[in-house]
Image (cartoon, grey):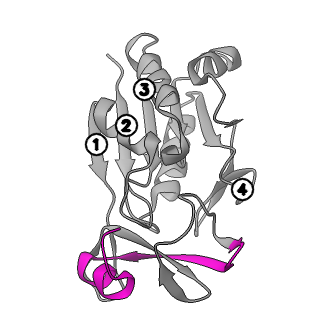
Amino acid sequence: MAKLYFRYGAMNSGKSTALIQVAHNYEERGQRVLVVKPAIDTKGDGIESRVVSRAADLVIDGDTALRTAVQAVGEPDCVLVDEAQFLTGTQVEDLFQLAVLDGVPVIAYGLRGDFRTKAFPGSLRLLELAHSIEELKTICRCGKKAMFNGRAVDGAFTQVGGQVAIDGTVQDGAVQYESLCGACYLLKVGSLG
């Protein structure tokens, strides 16, 4: 039986790099991979990591019936999803159905929580439905394991703003994110949201 996997981690934990490596491994063995990316991630048309990049085969918006869209493209040997936190709950249910009804392994990569330590809808549903959940680890600048994503606007950490703001600018200034351990999150941001 194929499974739905959720591999999550804080910012800069290598999620996109791992996805690209898994895609390479499948393709090196002559298997067809379908790489999916939510359109809300505006960093480019493909999967972008700090190390490598790759084109996305399917860019979807929040209204896309994901199982139907994958089936329309053909029969992949594996579906890989980048930025899975941006999926809707219904789209995650589509991924579960692709795995258990269609026999297609699905590996979704994404953040568990936002800059206020609140779960993204897609991540929450993945935590509820995934057959396998794996944390990809990274470190805080202090050297401890990072588990939170701090948002800084013009260099000052904040808990103000919408749940989604891709690196760049927002109405109030330049946005950047930093992976933080629990102690540094509390020190820099001030509370758990």
- Residue topped by disc 1: 133
What residue lies at 46% left-to-right and 40% top-to-bottom?
Answer: 122
Which image quarter holds the C terminus? bottom left
What residue lies at 34% left-to-right and 58% top-to-bottom?
Answer: 136
- Hey, what amino acid is under mark 2? Leu
**Residue 126: mark in rendering:** 2
**Nearer to us: label 2 or label 1:** 2
- Residue topped by disc 3: 105
Q: Position of residue 75 (x, y in %)?
A: 60, 16
What residue lies at 33% left-to-right and 79% top-to-bottom?
Answer: 185
Indicate which disc, 4 or 2, sits on the residue closer to the N terminus.
Answer: 4
Is any atom of residue 154 visible in this view? yes
| Left or right: residue 150 compared with residue 167 | left
Using the numbered discs, state the Cα–Cα distance from disc 4 to disc 2 in whole angstroms: 22 Å
Is any atom of residue 104 visible in this view? no
Indicate which disc, 2 or 3, sits on the residue closer to the N terminus.
Answer: 3
SS for tag 4? Answer: loop
What residue lies at 45% left-to-right and 62% top-to-bottom?
Answer: 14
Indicate which disc, 1 or 4, sits on the residue closer to the N terminus.
Answer: 4
Indicate which disc, 4 or 3, sits on the residue closer to the N terminus.
Answer: 4
| Left or right: residue 40 compared with residue 89 | right
Q: How crowded is mark 4: few (under 14 residues within 10 Å), some or many (20 or more)?
A: few
| Left or right: residue 158 compared with residue 165 | left
SS for tag 3? Answer: loop
Which image quarter holds the N terminus? top left
Vertical comparison of 33 with 10: above or below:
above
